[in-house]
Protein backbone atom coordinates (compact mmCIF):
# COMPACT_ATOMS: atom_id res chain seq x y z
CA UNK A 1 0.00 0.00 0.00
CA UNK A 2 1.34 3.42 -0.83
CA UNK A 3 0.44 6.06 1.68
CA UNK A 4 -0.24 9.51 0.36
CA UNK A 5 2.47 11.86 1.47
CA UNK A 6 1.93 15.57 1.05
CA UNK A 7 2.49 16.61 -2.58
CA UNK A 8 4.06 20.03 -2.30
CA UNK A 9 3.46 22.87 -4.73
CA UNK A 10 5.26 25.87 -3.30
CA UNK A 11 4.38 29.36 -4.47
CA UNK A 12 5.74 31.56 -1.67
CA UNK A 13 9.23 30.13 -2.12
CA UNK A 14 9.03 31.34 -5.75
CA UNK A 15 8.90 34.93 -4.52
CA UNK A 16 12.30 36.69 -4.36
CA UNK A 17 14.76 35.72 -1.66
CA UNK A 18 14.18 38.83 0.37
CA UNK A 19 10.75 37.43 1.27
CA UNK A 20 12.14 34.51 3.22
CA UNK A 21 15.23 32.69 4.29
CA UNK A 22 15.94 29.05 3.52
CA UNK A 23 15.65 27.23 6.79
CA UNK A 24 15.53 23.55 7.60
CA UNK A 25 13.86 22.59 10.85
CA UNK A 26 16.36 21.73 13.59
CA UNK A 27 16.13 18.02 14.49
CA UNK A 28 14.94 17.01 17.94
CA UNK A 29 16.07 14.27 20.31
CA UNK A 30 13.11 11.97 20.65
CA UNK A 31 9.95 12.63 18.68
CA UNK A 32 6.74 11.15 20.00
CA UNK A 33 3.29 11.52 18.56
CA UNK A 34 0.68 13.31 20.66
CA UNK A 35 -2.21 13.66 18.24
CA UNK A 36 -2.97 13.57 14.54
CA UNK A 37 -6.02 15.37 13.20
CA UNK A 38 -7.61 12.71 11.02
CA UNK A 39 -10.42 14.87 9.69
CA UNK A 40 -8.05 17.61 8.62
CA UNK A 41 -5.59 15.13 7.11
CA UNK A 42 -8.34 13.71 4.95
CA UNK A 43 -9.51 17.18 3.89
CA UNK A 44 -5.92 17.89 2.86
CA UNK A 45 -5.56 14.61 1.02
CA UNK A 46 -2.72 13.43 3.27
CA UNK A 47 -2.96 9.97 4.73
CA UNK A 48 -3.28 9.90 8.51
CA UNK A 49 -1.59 6.48 8.44
CA UNK A 50 1.42 8.07 6.81
CA UNK A 51 1.47 10.89 9.37
CA UNK A 52 1.44 8.25 12.09
CA UNK A 53 4.18 6.17 10.46
CA UNK A 54 7.81 6.49 11.61
CA UNK A 55 8.54 8.56 8.50
CA UNK A 56 5.55 10.83 9.10
CA UNK A 57 6.55 11.37 12.71
CA UNK A 58 10.08 12.34 11.65
CA UNK A 59 8.63 14.91 9.27
CA UNK A 60 6.27 16.35 11.91
CA UNK A 61 9.17 16.63 14.35
CA UNK A 62 11.43 18.35 11.83
CA UNK A 63 13.91 15.47 11.75
CA UNK A 64 13.34 14.79 8.09
CA UNK A 65 12.53 17.18 5.28
CA UNK A 66 9.94 15.52 3.08
CA UNK A 67 10.27 15.31 -0.67
CA UNK A 68 9.07 18.46 -2.40
CA UNK A 69 9.36 20.63 0.68
CA UNK A 70 11.47 23.78 0.41
CA UNK A 71 11.62 24.81 4.03
CA UNK A 72 11.70 28.54 4.68
CA UNK A 73 11.24 31.04 7.47
CA UNK A 74 9.12 34.00 6.34
CA UNK A 75 10.07 37.64 6.83
CA UNK A 76 7.60 40.04 8.42
CA UNK A 77 7.43 43.08 10.66
CA UNK A 78 4.64 44.37 12.84
CA UNK A 79 3.14 46.71 15.37
CA UNK A 80 3.27 44.99 18.75
CA UNK A 81 1.13 46.58 21.45
CA UNK A 82 1.15 49.72 19.35
CA UNK A 83 4.93 49.92 18.90
CA UNK A 84 6.64 49.45 15.55
CA UNK A 85 9.02 46.53 15.12
CA UNK A 86 10.60 46.61 11.65
CA UNK A 87 11.86 43.04 11.79
CA UNK A 88 10.09 40.06 13.33
CA UNK A 89 9.82 37.09 10.98
CA UNK A 90 9.37 33.41 11.79
CA UNK A 91 11.59 33.04 14.83
CA UNK A 92 10.38 29.56 15.67
CA UNK A 93 8.39 28.38 12.70
CA UNK A 94 9.36 26.78 9.43
CA UNK A 95 7.10 26.67 6.42
CA UNK A 96 7.59 23.25 4.85
CA UNK A 97 5.66 24.26 1.78
CA UNK A 98 2.19 24.38 0.28
CA UNK A 99 -0.12 21.65 -0.80
CA UNK A 100 -3.22 21.77 -2.96
CA UNK A 101 -6.15 19.71 -1.72
CA UNK A 102 -8.21 17.39 -3.91
CA UNK A 103 -10.78 20.25 -3.93
CA UNK A 104 -8.16 22.61 -5.32
CA UNK A 105 -7.53 24.68 -2.19
CA UNK A 106 -3.99 25.70 -1.35
CA UNK A 107 -2.67 25.38 2.21
CA UNK A 108 0.58 26.15 3.99
CA UNK A 109 2.06 23.37 6.10
CA UNK A 110 4.15 24.92 8.85
CA UNK A 111 6.03 23.49 11.81
CA UNK A 112 5.77 25.76 14.83
CA UNK A 113 8.50 25.28 17.42
CA UNK A 114 10.93 23.85 14.86
CA UNK A 115 14.12 25.51 16.10
CA UNK A 116 16.07 28.69 15.64
CA UNK A 117 15.97 30.70 12.44
CA UNK A 118 17.66 33.88 11.25
CA UNK A 119 14.73 35.77 12.80
CA UNK A 120 14.97 34.22 16.27
CA UNK A 121 16.78 37.14 17.91
CA UNK A 122 17.26 36.02 21.55
CA UNK A 123 14.71 33.20 21.36
CA UNK A 124 15.34 29.46 21.33
CA UNK A 125 13.04 28.75 18.40
CA UNK A 126 11.12 26.24 20.47
CA UNK A 127 7.72 25.91 22.01
CA UNK A 128 6.72 24.34 25.30
CA UNK A 129 4.07 21.65 25.30
CA UNK A 130 1.41 23.84 26.95
CA UNK A 131 1.08 26.45 24.21
CA UNK A 132 1.08 23.72 21.56
CA UNK A 133 -1.81 21.95 23.26
CA UNK A 134 -3.68 25.23 23.77
CA UNK A 135 -3.34 26.15 20.10
CA UNK A 136 -4.44 22.66 19.04
CA UNK A 137 -7.53 22.75 21.28
CA UNK A 138 -8.62 26.31 20.58
CA UNK A 139 -7.93 26.40 16.84
CA UNK A 140 -9.84 23.16 16.29
CA UNK A 141 -12.68 24.43 18.48
CA UNK A 142 -12.83 27.62 16.40
CA UNK A 143 -12.92 25.59 13.18
CA UNK A 144 -15.79 23.50 14.55
CA UNK A 145 -17.58 26.70 15.55
CA UNK A 146 -17.38 27.87 11.94
CA UNK A 147 -14.81 30.60 12.51
CA UNK A 148 -12.12 31.07 9.83
CA UNK A 149 -8.89 29.95 11.46
CA UNK A 150 -5.54 28.29 11.01
CA UNK A 151 -5.81 24.59 11.80
CA UNK A 152 -3.81 22.04 13.73
CA UNK A 153 -2.78 18.93 11.82
CA UNK A 154 -0.55 17.38 14.46
CA UNK A 155 1.14 17.83 17.80
CA UNK A 156 4.34 15.98 18.62
CA UNK A 157 6.58 15.95 21.67
CA UNK A 158 10.25 16.61 21.04
CA UNK A 159 11.73 14.70 23.97
CA UNK A 160 13.71 17.84 24.76
CA UNK A 161 13.07 20.35 27.45
CA UNK A 162 12.50 24.02 26.86
CA UNK A 163 13.62 26.49 29.47
CA UNK A 164 11.02 29.09 30.49
CA UNK A 165 10.39 30.06 34.14
CA UNK A 166 11.21 26.40 34.64
CA UNK A 167 12.18 23.57 32.32
CA UNK A 168 9.14 22.39 30.37
CA UNK A 169 8.63 19.58 27.88
CA UNK A 170 9.01 20.76 24.29
CA UNK A 171 6.54 20.18 21.47
CA UNK A 172 5.90 21.07 17.84
CA UNK A 173 2.58 21.97 16.27
CA UNK A 174 1.92 21.39 12.58
CA UNK A 175 -0.10 24.42 11.60
CA UNK A 176 -2.18 24.58 8.44
CA UNK A 177 -3.27 27.94 7.05
CA UNK A 178 -4.54 29.14 3.70
CA UNK A 179 -1.41 31.32 3.95
CA UNK A 180 0.73 32.87 6.65
CA UNK A 181 0.77 36.31 5.06
CA UNK A 182 0.19 38.95 7.70
CA UNK A 183 -0.59 42.65 7.77
CA UNK A 184 2.96 42.72 9.13
CA UNK A 185 4.30 41.10 5.96
CA UNK A 186 3.20 44.18 4.01
CA UNK A 187 4.58 46.41 6.73
CA UNK A 188 7.96 44.71 6.48
CA UNK A 189 8.49 45.83 2.91
CA UNK A 190 6.89 49.21 3.51
CA UNK A 191 9.44 49.78 6.26
CA UNK A 192 12.15 49.22 3.71
CA UNK A 193 10.33 51.31 1.06
CA UNK A 194 10.65 48.27 -1.18
CA UNK A 195 7.71 49.00 -3.47
CA UNK A 196 8.59 46.27 -5.95
CA UNK A 197 8.30 43.72 -3.18
CA UNK A 198 5.02 45.30 -2.03
CA UNK A 199 3.57 44.90 -5.51
CA UNK A 200 4.78 41.31 -5.81
CA UNK A 201 3.30 40.52 -2.41
CA UNK A 202 -0.01 42.21 -3.22
CA UNK A 203 -0.23 40.36 -6.54
CA UNK A 204 0.53 37.09 -4.79
CA UNK A 205 -2.18 37.72 -2.17
CA UNK A 206 -4.71 38.73 -4.81
CA UNK A 207 -4.05 35.59 -6.85
CA UNK A 208 -4.22 33.43 -3.78
CA UNK A 209 -7.01 34.96 -1.71
CA UNK A 210 -8.84 37.71 -3.60
CA UNK A 211 -8.93 36.72 -7.27
CA UNK A 212 -11.94 39.02 -7.83
CA UNK A 213 -9.73 42.02 -6.97
CA UNK A 214 -7.61 41.32 -10.05
CA UNK A 215 -10.57 42.31 -12.23
CA UNK A 216 -11.03 45.62 -10.44
CA UNK A 217 -9.62 48.77 -12.01
CA UNK A 218 -7.77 49.39 -8.71
CA UNK A 219 -6.73 45.89 -7.59
CA UNK A 220 -4.75 47.04 -4.54
CA UNK A 221 -7.63 49.07 -3.17
CA UNK A 222 -9.99 46.21 -3.92
CA UNK A 223 -7.58 43.99 -2.00
CA UNK A 224 -7.72 46.35 0.98
CA UNK A 225 -11.52 46.36 0.85
CA UNK A 226 -11.56 42.58 0.64
CA UNK A 227 -9.36 42.19 3.71
CA UNK A 228 -11.50 44.69 5.61
CA UNK A 229 -14.69 42.83 4.75
CA UNK A 230 -13.31 39.48 5.91
CA UNK A 231 -11.86 40.92 9.10
CA UNK A 232 -15.14 42.67 9.93
CA UNK A 233 -16.96 39.36 9.72
CA UNK A 234 -14.21 37.51 11.59
CA UNK A 235 -14.12 39.89 14.55
CA UNK A 236 -17.93 39.80 14.75
CA UNK A 237 -17.71 36.01 15.00
CA UNK A 238 -15.14 36.29 17.79
CA UNK A 239 -17.38 38.67 19.70
CA UNK A 240 -20.49 36.56 19.34
CA UNK A 241 -18.61 33.59 20.80
CA UNK A 242 -16.90 35.53 23.58
CA UNK A 243 -13.46 34.83 22.13
CA UNK A 244 -10.56 37.01 23.24
CA UNK A 245 -7.52 36.78 21.01
CA UNK A 246 -5.24 38.46 23.51
CA UNK A 247 -2.43 39.61 21.25
CA UNK A 248 -3.86 41.34 18.20
CA UNK A 249 -0.57 42.73 16.94
CA UNK A 250 -0.42 43.43 13.21
CA UNK A 251 1.90 40.45 12.77
CA UNK A 252 -0.86 38.27 14.20
CA UNK A 253 -3.47 39.37 11.67
CA UNK A 254 -3.65 37.33 8.48
CA UNK A 255 -4.72 39.00 5.25
CA UNK A 256 -6.64 35.81 4.37
CA UNK A 257 -9.05 36.61 7.22
CA UNK A 258 -8.22 33.53 9.29
CA UNK A 259 -7.63 33.73 13.03
CA UNK A 260 -3.98 33.08 13.87
CA UNK A 261 -1.68 32.79 16.88
CA UNK A 262 -3.50 31.28 19.81
CA UNK A 263 -1.15 32.59 22.47
CA UNK A 264 -2.82 34.19 25.47
CA UNK A 265 -6.29 33.64 24.04
CA UNK A 266 -9.37 32.68 26.04
CA UNK A 267 -13.14 32.53 25.96
CA UNK A 268 -15.18 34.66 28.32
CA UNK A 269 -16.80 32.95 31.23
CA UNK A 270 -18.63 35.87 32.86
CA UNK A 271 -19.72 38.48 30.39
CA UNK A 272 -17.87 41.74 30.77
CA UNK A 273 -16.61 43.85 27.86
CA UNK A 274 -13.51 44.92 29.80
CA UNK A 275 -12.16 41.39 30.21
CA UNK A 276 -8.45 40.90 29.56
CA UNK A 277 -6.61 37.62 29.96
CA UNK A 278 -3.17 38.16 28.56
CA UNK A 279 -0.50 38.45 31.23
CA UNK A 280 1.44 40.80 28.95
CA UNK A 281 -1.48 43.13 28.15
CA UNK A 282 -1.28 45.29 31.24
CA UNK A 283 -3.24 48.22 29.79
CA UNK A 284 -6.09 46.20 28.40
CA UNK A 285 -5.32 47.19 24.82
CA UNK A 286 -6.62 43.83 23.64
CA UNK A 287 -9.59 43.52 25.99
CA UNK A 288 -12.69 41.76 24.64
CA UNK A 289 -14.58 45.00 24.07
CA UNK A 290 -11.63 46.64 22.30
CA UNK A 291 -11.16 43.99 19.63
CA UNK A 292 -13.17 45.72 16.88
CA UNK A 293 -11.36 49.04 17.40
CA UNK A 294 -7.98 47.32 17.41
CA UNK A 295 -8.77 45.41 14.24
CA UNK A 296 -9.60 48.73 12.61
CA UNK A 297 -6.33 50.20 13.89
CA UNK A 298 -4.41 47.26 12.37
CA UNK A 299 -6.26 47.60 9.07
CA UNK A 300 -5.44 51.30 8.95
CA UNK A 301 -1.79 50.22 8.85
CA UNK A 302 -2.53 47.92 5.97
CA UNK A 303 -4.14 50.85 4.17
CA UNK A 304 -1.17 53.12 4.86
CA UNK A 305 1.36 50.65 3.55
CA UNK A 306 -0.69 49.74 0.47
CA UNK A 307 -1.33 53.32 -0.64
CA UNK A 308 2.17 53.99 -2.03
CA UNK A 309 1.74 51.20 -4.59
CA UNK A 310 -1.71 52.27 -5.75
CA UNK A 311 -1.22 53.68 -9.25
CA UNK A 312 -2.73 56.95 -10.45
CA UNK A 313 -3.70 60.08 -8.60
CA UNK A 314 -3.07 60.12 -4.89
CA UNK A 315 -6.11 61.99 -3.53
CA UNK A 316 -8.86 59.72 -4.78
CA UNK A 317 -6.91 56.67 -3.61
CA UNK A 318 -6.42 58.12 -0.13
CA UNK A 319 -10.09 59.04 0.00
CA UNK A 320 -11.22 55.56 -0.99
CA UNK A 321 -8.83 53.91 1.49
CA UNK A 322 -10.11 56.19 4.25
CA UNK A 323 -13.68 55.32 3.44
CA UNK A 324 -12.83 51.66 3.51
CA UNK A 325 -11.25 51.99 6.95
CA UNK A 326 -14.15 54.02 8.27
CA UNK A 327 -16.55 51.50 6.76
CA UNK A 328 -14.96 48.71 8.77
CA UNK A 329 -16.95 49.57 11.90
CA UNK A 330 -20.19 49.72 9.95
CA UNK A 331 -19.52 46.32 8.38
CA UNK A 332 -18.47 44.90 11.70
CA UNK A 333 -21.58 46.22 13.44
CA UNK A 334 -23.87 44.85 10.77
CA UNK A 335 -22.27 41.40 11.09
CA UNK A 336 -22.30 41.59 14.88
CA UNK A 337 -25.96 42.60 14.92
CA UNK A 338 -26.92 39.74 12.64
CA UNK A 339 -24.95 37.14 14.61
CA UNK A 340 -26.11 38.38 18.01
CA UNK A 341 -29.70 38.27 16.84
CA UNK A 342 -29.19 34.70 15.70
CA UNK A 343 -28.23 33.97 19.29
CA UNK A 344 -31.71 35.16 20.23
CA UNK A 345 -33.41 33.26 17.44
CA UNK A 346 -34.25 36.42 15.52
CA UNK A 347 -33.59 36.36 11.79
CA UNK A 348 -34.80 39.91 11.06
CA UNK A 349 -33.40 42.51 13.46
CA UNK A 350 -35.24 45.78 13.99
CA UNK A 351 -35.17 48.62 16.50
CA UNK A 352 -37.22 46.78 19.09
CA UNK A 353 -35.07 43.64 18.90
CA UNK A 354 -31.97 45.85 19.24
CA UNK A 355 -33.44 47.12 22.50
CA UNK A 356 -34.03 43.56 23.70
CA UNK A 357 -30.47 42.58 22.90
CA UNK A 358 -29.04 45.63 24.61
CA UNK A 359 -31.10 45.00 27.71
CA UNK A 360 -29.92 41.40 27.84
CA UNK A 361 -26.24 42.32 27.51
CA UNK A 362 -26.68 45.02 30.09
CA UNK A 363 -28.19 42.65 32.64
CA UNK A 364 -25.57 40.00 31.85
CA UNK A 365 -22.80 42.51 32.53
CA UNK A 366 -24.39 43.75 35.73
CA UNK A 367 -25.08 40.28 37.07
CA UNK A 368 -21.87 38.75 35.75
CA UNK A 369 -23.74 36.08 33.85
CA UNK A 370 -21.84 33.30 32.17
CA UNK A 371 -21.83 34.22 28.49
CA UNK A 372 -22.02 30.75 26.93
CA UNK A 373 -24.46 29.30 29.45
CA UNK A 374 -26.88 32.20 29.28
CA UNK A 375 -27.32 31.68 25.56
CA UNK A 376 -27.42 27.88 25.89
CA UNK A 377 -30.16 28.34 28.45
CA UNK A 378 -32.15 30.59 26.12
CA UNK A 379 -31.70 28.01 23.37
CA UNK A 380 -33.11 25.30 25.64
CA UNK A 381 -36.09 27.53 26.51
CA UNK A 382 -36.80 28.44 22.89
CA UNK A 383 -36.60 24.84 21.75
CA UNK A 384 -38.64 23.47 24.65
CA UNK A 385 -35.61 21.31 25.38
CA UNK A 386 -36.48 20.45 28.97
CA UNK A 387 -33.68 17.91 29.31
CA UNK A 388 -31.00 20.48 28.52
CA UNK A 389 -32.80 23.08 30.60
CA UNK A 390 -32.92 20.78 33.63
CA UNK A 391 -29.30 19.83 33.13
CA UNK A 392 -28.23 23.47 33.15
CA UNK A 393 -30.46 24.32 36.10
CA UNK A 394 -28.92 21.47 38.09
CA UNK A 395 -25.72 23.46 38.53
CA UNK A 396 -26.44 27.00 37.41
CA UNK A 397 -28.76 29.80 38.44
CA UNK A 398 -29.74 32.17 35.66
CA UNK A 399 -29.06 35.85 36.38
CA UNK A 400 -32.00 37.05 38.55
CA UNK A 401 -33.12 39.82 36.17
CA UNK A 402 -33.46 37.35 33.31
CA UNK A 403 -36.93 36.49 34.60
CA UNK A 404 -38.04 40.08 33.88
CA UNK A 405 -36.44 40.07 30.45
CA UNK A 406 -37.81 36.74 29.21
CA UNK A 407 -41.46 37.75 28.59
CA UNK A 408 -40.46 40.54 26.20
CA UNK A 409 -38.21 38.19 24.25
CA UNK A 410 -40.81 35.43 24.15
CA UNK A 411 -43.46 37.87 22.94
CA UNK A 412 -41.08 38.99 20.22
CA UNK A 413 -40.49 35.40 19.11
CA UNK A 414 -44.26 34.83 18.93
CA UNK A 415 -44.90 37.88 16.83
CA UNK A 416 -41.98 37.20 14.48
CA UNK A 417 -44.12 34.41 13.08
CA UNK A 418 -41.07 32.38 12.13
CA UNK A 419 -41.26 28.62 12.13
CA UNK A 420 -40.32 27.48 15.66
CA UNK A 421 -38.03 24.70 14.56
CA UNK A 422 -36.15 26.96 12.11
CA UNK A 423 -35.74 29.44 14.95
CA UNK A 424 -34.44 26.78 17.29
CA UNK A 425 -32.00 25.64 14.63
CA UNK A 426 -30.76 29.21 14.18
CA UNK A 427 -30.16 29.48 17.91
CA UNK A 428 -28.49 26.10 18.20
CA UNK A 429 -25.96 27.00 15.50
CA UNK A 430 -25.23 30.39 17.07
CA UNK A 431 -24.97 29.17 20.66
CA UNK A 432 -22.39 26.46 21.25
CA UNK A 433 -22.81 24.38 24.40
CA UNK A 434 -19.15 23.49 24.64
CA UNK A 435 -16.30 25.94 24.30
CA UNK A 436 -12.73 25.39 25.41
CA UNK A 437 -13.16 27.01 28.79
CA UNK A 438 -9.91 28.28 30.25
CA UNK A 439 -9.98 26.17 33.35
CA UNK A 440 -10.46 23.05 31.24
CA UNK A 441 -7.63 24.02 28.92
CA UNK A 442 -5.34 24.73 31.86
CA UNK A 443 -6.32 21.45 33.51
CA UNK A 444 -5.51 19.51 30.33
CA UNK A 445 -2.19 21.32 29.92
CA UNK A 446 -1.20 20.71 33.55
CA UNK A 447 -1.97 16.98 33.35
CA UNK A 448 0.10 16.65 30.17
CA UNK A 449 2.98 18.82 31.36
CA UNK A 450 3.26 17.61 34.93
CA UNK A 451 2.11 13.99 34.68
CA UNK A 452 2.53 13.10 31.02
CA UNK A 453 -1.19 12.37 30.99
CA UNK A 454 -2.80 13.37 27.68
CA UNK A 455 -6.24 11.93 28.36
CA UNK A 456 -7.82 15.26 29.38
CA UNK A 457 -6.35 16.91 26.27
CA UNK A 458 -7.78 14.26 23.96
CA UNK A 459 -11.19 14.35 25.66
CA UNK A 460 -11.31 18.13 25.49
CA UNK A 461 -10.46 18.13 21.79
CA UNK A 462 -13.23 15.60 21.14
CA UNK A 463 -15.74 17.64 23.09
CA UNK A 464 -15.02 21.09 21.70
CA UNK A 465 -14.94 19.83 18.13
CA UNK A 466 -18.62 18.83 18.53
CA UNK A 467 -19.68 22.09 20.18
CA UNK A 468 -23.39 22.01 19.36
CA UNK A 469 -24.21 18.40 20.23
CA UNK A 470 -25.69 18.04 23.69
CA UNK A 471 -24.30 15.10 25.60
CA UNK A 472 -25.90 14.56 29.02
CA UNK A 473 -22.77 12.67 30.08
CA UNK A 474 -20.60 15.72 29.41
CA UNK A 475 -21.87 18.07 32.08
CA UNK A 476 -18.34 18.77 33.24
CA UNK A 477 -17.68 20.60 29.96
CA UNK A 478 -20.82 22.67 30.26
CA UNK A 479 -20.02 24.01 33.70
CA UNK A 480 -18.38 27.34 34.35
CA UNK A 481 -15.33 27.36 36.61
CA UNK A 482 -15.79 27.23 40.34
CA UNK A 483 -14.34 30.33 42.00
CA UNK A 484 -11.04 28.59 42.70
CA UNK A 485 -10.83 27.38 39.08
CA UNK A 486 -11.19 30.78 37.47
CA UNK A 487 -8.24 31.52 35.23
CA UNK A 488 -7.34 35.18 35.37
CA UNK A 489 -4.35 35.18 33.07
CA UNK A 490 -3.02 33.13 30.26
CA UNK A 491 0.57 33.42 29.27
CA UNK A 492 1.92 34.24 25.89
CA UNK A 493 3.01 31.19 23.97
CA UNK A 494 6.68 32.05 23.92
P1 LIG B 1 4.19 35.52 18.75
O1 LIG B 1 4.08 36.12 20.12
O2 LIG B 1 4.11 34.02 18.76
O3 LIG B 1 3.27 36.15 17.79
O4 LIG B 1 5.67 35.85 18.28
C1 LIG B 1 6.14 37.13 18.06
C2 LIG B 1 7.52 37.08 17.46
O5 LIG B 1 8.45 36.47 18.36
C3 LIG B 1 7.61 36.26 16.18
O6 LIG B 1 8.59 36.86 15.36
C4 LIG B 1 8.06 34.93 16.67
O7 LIG B 1 8.68 34.16 15.66
C5 LIG B 1 9.03 35.32 17.76
N1 LIG B 1 9.18 34.27 18.77
C6 LIG B 1 8.26 33.88 19.67
N2 LIG B 1 8.73 32.89 20.44
C7 LIG B 1 9.97 32.63 20.03
C8 LIG B 1 11.00 31.72 20.43
N3 LIG B 1 10.80 30.86 21.43
N4 LIG B 1 12.15 31.74 19.76
C9 LIG B 1 12.36 32.60 18.76
N5 LIG B 1 11.45 33.49 18.33
C10 LIG B 1 10.27 33.51 18.96
MG1 LIG C 1 2.80 35.77 15.98
Image (cartoon, rainbow, N blue to C red):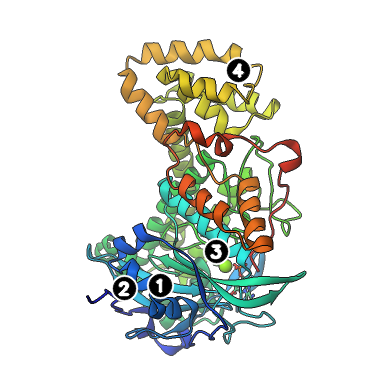
Residue count near mark 3 (Cα–Cα under 10 Å), binned few <14, some 14–19, many ≥20: many
Mark 2 vs mark 4, CA separation in Å: 50 Å
Say which residue label 1 marks: 109
Dividing the image into 4 quarters, which one contains the N terminus?
bottom left
Circles 2 and 3: CB atoms closer than 8 Å: no
Residue count near mark 1 (Cα–Cα under 10 Å), binned few <14, some 14–19, many ≥20: many
Mark 4 vs mark 1, CA separation in Å: 47 Å
Q: Is mark 3 within 8 Å of ligand 2?
A: yes
Say which residue label 2 marks: 99
Mark 2 vs mark 1, CA separation in Å: 7 Å
Say whether residue 347 is visible: no
Say which residue label 3 marks: 252
The picture places residue 139, in percent across and down from the top left corner, at 49, 56
Left or right: where does residue 320 sit relative to residue 247? left
Q: Could you say which quadrant of the image residue 219 lies in?
A: bottom left
Circles 4 and 3: CB atoms closer than 8 Å: no
Q: Secondary structure at mark 4?
A: helix
> Quick one: 49 or 400, which is closer to the camera?
49
Q: Which mark is residue 402?
A: 4
The picture places residue 478, in percent across and down from the top left corner, at 56, 35
> Disc 2 vs disc 3: which is toward the camera?
2
Amino acid sequence: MTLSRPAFDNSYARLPERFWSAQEPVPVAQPALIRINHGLASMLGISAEWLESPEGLEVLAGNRVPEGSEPIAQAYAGHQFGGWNPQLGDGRAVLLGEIVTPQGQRYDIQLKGAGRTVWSRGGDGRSPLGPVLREYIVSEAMAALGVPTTRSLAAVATGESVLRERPLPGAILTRVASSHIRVGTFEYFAGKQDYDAQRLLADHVIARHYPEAARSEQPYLALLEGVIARQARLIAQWQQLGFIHGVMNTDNMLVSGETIDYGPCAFLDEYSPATVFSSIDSFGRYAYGNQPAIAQWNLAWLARVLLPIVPGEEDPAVHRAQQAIEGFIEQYEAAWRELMHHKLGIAQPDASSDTLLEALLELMTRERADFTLTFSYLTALAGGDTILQADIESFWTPPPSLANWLPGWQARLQQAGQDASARHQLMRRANPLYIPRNHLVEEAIAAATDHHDFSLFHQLVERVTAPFDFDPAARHYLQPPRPEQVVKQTFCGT
